[in-house]
Amino acid sequence: MKEFHGISASPGIVISKAFLYNEDSFSVPRYEIKEEDIEHEILRYKKAVKVAAGELNNLKKKIIKEHSDDEARFLDSHLLMLHDPIFTDQIYEKLRHVQTNIEWVVQNVVNDLVEKLNGSPDLYLRERSMDIDDVSKRIINHLMKRERISLADLAMELILVTPDLLPSDTLLMNKRMVKGIVMDAGGRTSHTAILARSFGIPAVLGLRSITREVKNGDTIIIDGLHGRVILEPDNETLEKYLRLQMEYLKRESELIYLNNLPAETQDGKKIFLKANIEVSEELESVHTYSAEGIGLFRSEFLIMRPGQENDEEAQFLEYRKVLEGMEGAPVTIRTLDVGGDKLIHEIAQKEEKNPLLGWRAIRFCLERKDIFKVQLRAMLRASVYGQLRIMFPMISGIEELESAHEVLDEVKAELKAEGIAYADHIPVGCMIEVPSAAMTSDILARKADFFSIGTNDLIQYTIAVDRGNEKITSMYEPFHPAVLRLIKIIVDNGHKAGIPVGMCGEMAGDPIATVILLGLGLDEFSMSAFSLPEIKKIIRSATILEAEEFLGALMDMKSFRDIDRYVRIWMEDRFDIIKG
Ligand code: PEP
Ligand code: MG
């Protein structure tokens, strides 16, 4: 038995047999050709491109019929790539230079390109390397007259184990047979993660080299809730997960009854439960889990595509889609939080010693007002299509908040002068995720319509522990007394000023933390949509009185380890929580 930890990309527990799917496992032969054969190789290439284009067009029709125009759009970029003159010229040039068979040349040119893209700090470019790979494999398969294994034809229930999945594979695979996905590559915002969530297929990604450990037919457990994969489990583990799976399925069925009920404590405090999203494709699961709004729309993923930071229309359309899709429920769009680990070209060019403490988020926007203004214009224009709330990230003091407001006012004035409409009242709030903001939250509250606590960053900055560094994860402790005290200060200051205080960091979606957060007085919790039912269940069976008493006991404790242990035992004893 072996256990692996990756990124929890789509929830659920599944136990099944492994199917190794490795499109990279074929080798492309290399042989030399004579100069007079070059034209013949070019002809072979042109023919393969033509067949591949026909195949892609058929695929496009099929996806439009079975899904939607939107979901087929990525194939347009594949078609463009097939006929891209720069790509084609590169292939012909290499062919003439090395005088080697064309399939080898294609693979060689593509490998170089993919390597360059994968080395880019830009997430969008790294993810685009998959599209190039997808297209080139299609061409090479035709050149070598190989049949591509089609995931659409799978006829047995299985867990797909693969280094990487191409978007076309994810979209077209037989979803009745693919019970889970385990992948070496990928993050929460990769195509595969987004699609797996929307199809409800449990997935753990970013496992680095799990494909080297798994053989076809091995038994695998995926615990998508905790990002865990267990290979060839022993009987005890198997029984444990069969039990957890039953519990999980039972819980899922409770969804239907919870969906129509408010998130209200036993003693009558109403809590607002909202969802965090990164892309509009997640709206479907936002509705499935009955979120009362979007508490955090991480807009930066939209503009990480090159050129889109200045594409007002593309941003406007995306915001409008989300606002309309939420049918009048509040949508909090956070202005760009680029920098740190979320790089765009502009920042990527500037080497920073401490990027997490560097030119990030609002600091970037206040300097690059051209980019900031484009986003604000797009948001304001979209505001007439729903209930928009604007939120500024990484505010560290009142100066930044005031400057951000000034830019917003400027953009409003410009729109007014142009006769472009925007909503009358748009609440503007700020994230509290830097300790200096927490400590001055009484001052910030006078200039904000709401606060949203970003614990992912607040914890990292408070304890000085990099949230992405595997070596120190045990120090990344949400129940550290310093963190609890800071949250209390923020909530109290917000309430004194009469504004609501929410939380949109991962802590809000952690069931172990729910009662503490109730005790601290939070008004709104925002999290990945799939976490909502479990949090709602706890809220509905707790009282504010017990939460305050529980918190009181914790606030007297000194060590985060003691607090953590106490909280876990108390919560698992008091509530029906799936144990991690
Ligand atoms: C946070 O810091 O808690 C947060 C929600 O923002 P992000 O994870 O995008 O930094
Ligand atoms: Mg943050």
Image (spheres, rainbow, N blue to C red):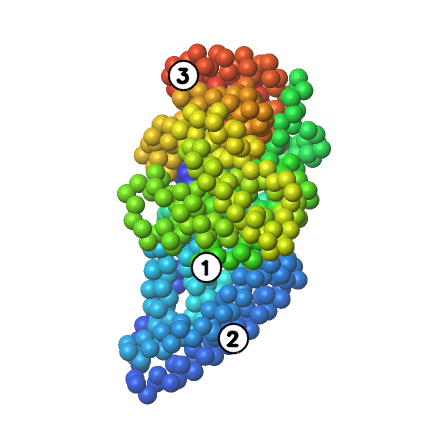
Q: Are marks 1 and 3 in contact (CB under 8 Å)?
A: no
Residue at (43%, 77%) from the top-left corner? 45
The mark found on residue 51 in the picture is 2
Q: Name the residue nearer the viewer: 150 or 558.
A: 558
Quarter of the image holding residue 328? top right
Residue 531, position in %: x, y?
56, 34
Residue at 34% x, 60% y: name it.
116
What type is the residue that disc 2 sits on?
A: Val
Q: Nearer the viewer, residue 23 or 190?
A: 190
Q: Position of residue 521 (x, y in %)?
A: 56, 21
Q: Is residue 216 visible?
A: no
* Residue nearest the observer in this picture, 418 or 220: 418
Position of residue 480 in the picture relative to residue 9 (left or right):
left
Q: Vertical placement of 541 versus 75: above or below?
A: above
Q: Which mark is residue 307?
A: 1
Tell me the tag on residue 562.
3
Q: Kindly report which numbered mark, 2 or 3, lies closer to the viewer in this rendering.
A: 3
